[in-house]
Image (tube, rainbow, N blue to C red):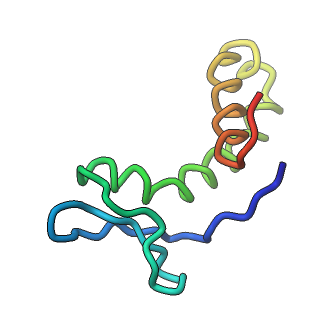
Amino acid sequence: MSTQHTPGPWEPSRMTHDWSVYAENGNGADLCASIKTAEDAALIAAAPDLLAACEGILPLLQSDLDALNNWEPEILAVEEAIAKAKGGGR
């Protein structure tokens, strides 16, 4: 399943009593609102960058036999995280 997410960068924004996350290049509407902590808002805002980093490193790890032998659980975790971020799963 290939879904299109709102392109980054996403930024956390302090509201009166909580946090929201918006896309700088979007229409100005919040992507996510009523986030209770700054840490959660920062994690959500980092999602597009985390996905891009995982997608960038995965082919390198998959092509490295030593990495495949030594880091198999971590490589599987990256594959699963990418699938989850794109709306799928394993």
Front residue (pair 76, 30): 30
Against 29, residue 56 (above or below) is above
Expressed as whole percent of the image width and height from the top left, the position of residue 42 reads: 34, 55
- Please provide percent x and percent y for residue 63: 83, 32
Image quadrant in which you'd find residue 69? top right
Q: Residue furthest top?
A: 69
Query: Residue lying farthest left?
Result: 16
Nearest the eye: 4 or 72: 4
Residue 81 image-quadrant placement: top right
Direction from residue 59 to residue 12 in the image, left or right: left
| 47 displayed left or right of 70 | left
Residue drawn where x is 70% and y is 17% of the image: 72
Left or right for 31, reference 77: left
Q: Quadrant of the C terminus?
A: top right
Residue 79: x and y, percent?
72, 33
Please name the residue shown 22% across and 68% down the image.
14
Question: Residue at point 61% right, 50% down?
Answer: 51
At 82% from the left and 54% from the top, the residue drawn is 2
